[in-house]
Each structure stands twice: as C-alpha cells, then as structure tokens.
Image (spheres, grey):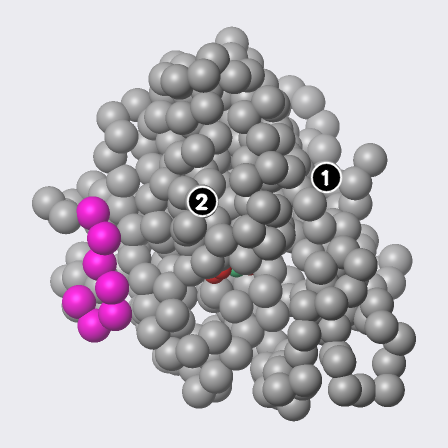
Amino acid sequence: MKPVVVIHGGAGAISPGTSSPEREREYHAALQAVLASAQAVLARGGSAIDAVSVAVVGLEDCPLFNAGHGAVYTSDETHELDAAIMDGATLRTGAIANVHHVRNPVLLARMVMERSRHVFFVGEGAERFARANGVTMVARDYFSTPLRLEQLRRAQRETPDVALLDRDGQPVLANRQTTPAEPIDPDRKFGTVGAVALDAAGNLAAATSTGGITNKQVGRVGDAPVIGAGTYANNATCAVSGTGTGEMYIRMVAAYDVSARMQYAGATLAEAADAVMFGTLPSIGGKGGLIAVDGQGNIALPFNTDRMYRGYARPGEQPVTEIYGK
Ligand code: ASP
C-alpha cells in the first residue's frame, strides 16, 4: 500500500481580472510546498492524521487561501473560522466553529479530538478551550488581508443585485452594466482548504479549515466543521474533505454520502465521489468540489466549478498540482 496525501485550496469560477499566469504560478508553488511537507511526514512513516494536520496548517498560513491568515470577512468585517479533523482508524473527531483568535483552527480541532471528551466546540467556549490547552492565539487582525477586505466591500456593494442566472449557475449581477455571464467574485463562496491522507499503516484521515463565505451573516457556520457534511474519514471506506456551497453540503451530508455509497452500495471511490459531486449536490444547486482517498490509495478529486486548486503527493514521487479541469 502506497501512502498518499491529497489537498485542496477551494473551488470556484474565475473572477474577472483576478487571474494571471503569475497568480497561477503562486498557487501552484504554494500547493507544491504544502504537499512537500505533508509528503515528508508520510515518507518517514508518519500518520495520516499528522499528514493532514501539517498540510492544513500550511494552507491556513498561506494568505492565498480562505482559511487562517487570509480568511474571508463576515458582514460585520470580522473573521469567524471553522475547522474539523477526523481519524478514520478510530472514528474520533474534533471540530470547532466561530473562533476569531486561533491562529491555526485545525490544530484546535485536533486538540478537541485528542484532549476533550466532547467533539464540537463553538465560539467563546472553543476559544476558552484553546487558551486552556496552550493553542497559539493571535489578535483578530492577524487574519485580515487587503484582498479579502476588497472582496467584502465588493460583495456588499453587489449583493442586493445578485441573482443566480447565468448558464453555469454562477451568481451574476442582474442590474449592472455587465455581460450576463460575468460571475461575481467566486471567492465569496469558495476557498476553503482541506486534506485527506492514507498512511503506511493503512489509516485514513481528513481535515478541513475555512473562513466560510465572504459577507456571511455573523454566527453562520458552514459544512467544513460539520462531521459528515464537509469532513469525514472511516478506514472502512474513505476520507473526504469538501469545498463549495456549504449549506448544500450540509443538506446532502455530502462527505458521509461518499462513504455510505461505498459501504452500503459497494460503489468504488470514484463512483461514490462522482455521484455526490455531479448528482446529489447539483440537484439542489450545490457547487464546488471534494477530495477523497480510500484504503487502497485510490484518489478522487471531482469538482463541478471551472477550477479547483488541488494536488496530491506520494512518497518518492513529484507532487502533482492542478487548477483547471482536464
Ligand atoms: N464550504 C465552505 C463554507 O461554506 C466555503 C468554501 O468551501 O470555500 O463555509
């Protein structure tokens, strides 16, 4: 069995004027660096849980992605971060939502998994648990970046006019002088980070971390920390991390659905992942992508948007990173 780690840095559509070859090179370089660090964990016999933790910390620390430093803003110009981690060997898990001082939310989620008799902490209690357990805390403005603030301003200017009309379901500006197919900034909806891994012992793990969606209402929690929706791992089937329209992932219990299709219907990883990504999620307007790995090291990275920042790495092999579809 060959260990493997798979990561994503969010899925979405191109935002006019925001993409360039240099920008894309930056994304590839960031994904490559994160994969290299997680690959090194697996290469020295490290666990899947360690590999996904290292990968998600790297993505949280990179301002290109909507998690940790670089997280999007709520409608109140604050940041509320969500994360989860799950160990497929034991089905132990930890999740946190609505924190605003925790530098690496995935590490707090892991601490919840390892040191608490509970599974899911939110808001004030999550922060208190973090302080009590020595998690690195930062000032609120650590998460702020000019790009995300501009995205918030734009979203707030444009939201009253938004309608979901265009050919591929991207939000468009109904009352503005613009081409009908011009999407509004996709980053308002997508950009979460996640990782799944299989280690040499045959164990699976998944982790997801996000700032949520730009201009979200204060207190809103998406799918990332909801076990079974945006994050799930079970050695008997697969490990999954999702990114996209969180409300739909919650309604369709998307990550668990991939696992359940394998467990109850005998689907392969690819069949199960495609059925969720191209069947159940779009049936209620769900857009985004997911990454998944099974106990044999098969991987799936389907998405139904025009891009998903993603990649995978196996020990001893050059990491692979991709942005667009094939
Ligand atoms: N799924 C995330 C959420 O709804 C957003 C994303 O994937 O970027 O919070």
Q: Residue 124: within the magenta?
A: yes
Q: Is residue 3 magenta?
A: no
Q: Quadrant of the C terminus?
A: top right
Which residue is painted at 80% across and 59% down in the image?
Answer: 167
Give the amino acid type for the residue marked by disc 1 in the picture: Thr
* SS at circle 2: loop
Q: Which residue occupies 60% across, 77% down?
A: 148
Which residue, given by chain and number where applicable, does mark 2 sit on? 252
Identify the element where label 1 is drawn: strand
Looking at the image, residue 233 lies above or below residue 103:
above
Q: Is residue 76 above or below residue 307?
A: below
- Magenta residues (range): 119-125
Report the disc number at residue 321: 1
Say whether residue 38 is visible.
no
The label number, if any, that marks residue 169 in the structure image: none
Mark 1 Cα-neighbour bin, 10 Å: few <14, some 14–19, many ≥20: many
Give the x, y percent position of residue 69: 51, 67
Identify the residue shown where x is 40% and y is 26%.
Answer: 260
The amino acid type of the residue labelled 2 equals Met
Decide if residue 308 is in sight here: yes
